Amino acid sequence: MATEDGGAAGGDEGSFLAGYDPHAFAPVAVTVDVAALTIRPGTAGRGREPHVLLVRRGEHPQRGRWALPGGFVRAEDTPQGPADDDLPDAALRVLSEKTLLPGPLHLEQLATYGARGRDPRMRVVSVAYLLMAPDLPEPHRGRGIEEAAWVPLRELGHGIGGRSRHALAFDHDRVLADAVERARSKLEYTSLATAFLPPVFTITELRGVYESVWGRELHAANFHRKILATPGFVEDTGELAERGGTGGGRRPRLYRAGGAATLHPPLLRSTQ
Amino acid sequence: MATEDGGAAGGDEGSFLAGYDPHAFAPVAVTVDVAALTIRPGTAGRGREPHVLLVRRGEHPQRGRWALPGGFVRAEDTPQGPADDDLPDAALRVLSEKTLLPGPLHLEQLATYGARGRDPRMRVVSVAYLLMAPDLPEPHRGRGIEEAAWVPLRELGHGIGGRSRHALAFDHDRVLADAVERARSKLEYTSLATAFLPPVFTITELRGVYESVWGRELHAANFHRKILATPGFVEDTGELAERGGTGGGRRPRLYRAGGAATLHPPLLRSTQ
DNA sequence: CAGAGAAACACTCAGCTTGAGAAAAACGGA
DNA sequence: TCCGTTTTTCTCAAGCTGAGTGTTTCTCTG
């Protein structure tokens, strides 16, 4: 950690802290940006596909461009509200200003971006978070936001093998690309796919998560065998779904997420 | 990103930036901390084992305690030196003050820690980096540092299945634990083990990396087969090592790191 | 109410990978 | 030359994977 001393002299730690001036350094702003991913019905009859929550910036800089929701980390209590106790708290606060956040959600830190010049105002270090959630409600407008919407990844060039186009504000295209790649690889060796589903789900719905995030179809029978053979991935509720598919079919069993966090062996996307 | 506006009014983006005051927000400091891991001969005749570079803090706060090397990110040019263009630059600068950094090294971002109260001076957000390197030279003292040394992970409780004891300053025990876990899991599905080795190495040396990082022995013959069967992991130089082991033995082939970044299929530590 | 179609799930099988061990090859030292 | 050591190759049974097929259970249609 820090070796520079902020202008305070030596002596014991108490007197050191009393003489410490936090404003002695060049100002750096810390923000959190959240890549909130969910799987919801796409435009037209294209089935369910991954979406990201985007906001259109209502203020400078980059006014009018789409961006990931974000905001400054509150280091101290301010008129706008109390300080953020930790970075994940800041991420959830920023996100709750845009959409309703129900139940347990999976929030994990993605990466931190701090290159010079990524924000024209000042040196900004941005901690990006990845949120994976089941179908969330439509977003609402927040302060300084013109518009907020769930946007299919496909439309942003992050879909099946697509190259990311430069569309978002700041370096958010890269942040989003990192988020999508993280989600894709986490499906391989963790049970996080269940984070995209409601508490109770079918194996076919689980397979739908993999198929829409990885962008390719999986062998249904083998997937079924593999999921049930992985200890702790899913847990049988003993019940069946109310109805089979629209065109008939056997009523599927209902499962809930099991306790396992990591999958042994993993479910590799590269093979098959 | 940010929605608060730093006191500047509306209008076009140019006049917005002219009126922007970076000091309008509560001060937050951004630091980088580096968990530099290397594999070197341990104390006594215990063979090679993973070490981390630690410094004993020579200044408040936490004076006298061992910590990961770190320092403030330089947002602007200062009398101490020029601004850091990006966070990895800051990490390498901080580390180069403690030890010699030769050749190509593997540096990757680990995580960012920003809980309130983790530093008594002010709100500090710390971006941690993981560095994996072949046997680096002994460290030298830097500004504000009493002592710097390579410390075996085993002595810190991060060894084979050990629970981390509270020994380091700030929350660096947790940072180090995250770093070790990241290194362990990265060996499974990437070819990063070669980052711990010199440019040319033998399969047995490569196995030694896995064994010392994972803390358990691997089946030599199966490891050999698996490495050579993984396309792009290692590349045959066509040469043999000068001498076999101390007590005789066949001269091993020499390899260099191949181009592959990720391993398909992975080398799982859980099985076997 | 029979039959078609659909979905969920079970089963089979060849091919591959894995863990474990044995054997061969290459080397130093006595 | 012979023995112990290290590297490398080989063998084999067990398990997993991908692909395909079959069975069960449902809806819909006529």
Image (spheres, coloured by chain):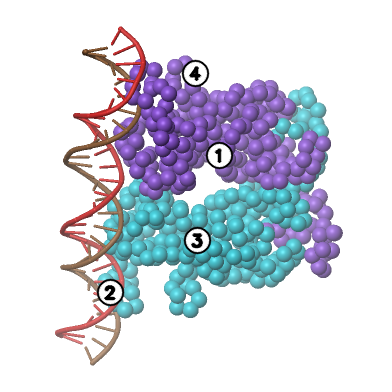
Chain colours: A cyan, B purple, C red, D brown
Q: Which residue in the protein does label 2 denote? A: A249
Rounded to the nearest angstrom, the CA distance separating label 1 from label 2 is 53 Å
Q: Are marks 3 and 4 in contact (CB under 8 Å)?
A: no
B158 sits to left or right of A271: right
Write down the residue under mark 1. Answer: B106
Q: Secondary structure at mark 1?
A: strand
Q: Circle 2 — which element?
A: loop
1 vs 3, front mark:
1
Q: Are marks 3 and 4 on the same chain?
A: no
Residues under labels 2 and 3: Cα distance? 28 Å
Q: Which mark is residue A133?
A: 3
Where residue B201 sits: x, y (%)? 45, 31
Query: Disc 3 to disc 4, how far (Cα)?
Result: 49 Å
Q: Residue at x 33, y 24 (%)?
A: B250
Q: Which chain is mark 4 on? A: B
Q: How many marks?
A: 4
Q: Is residue B224 above or below residue B262?
A: above
At a point 78% along the width and 28% down the height, the residue shown is A15
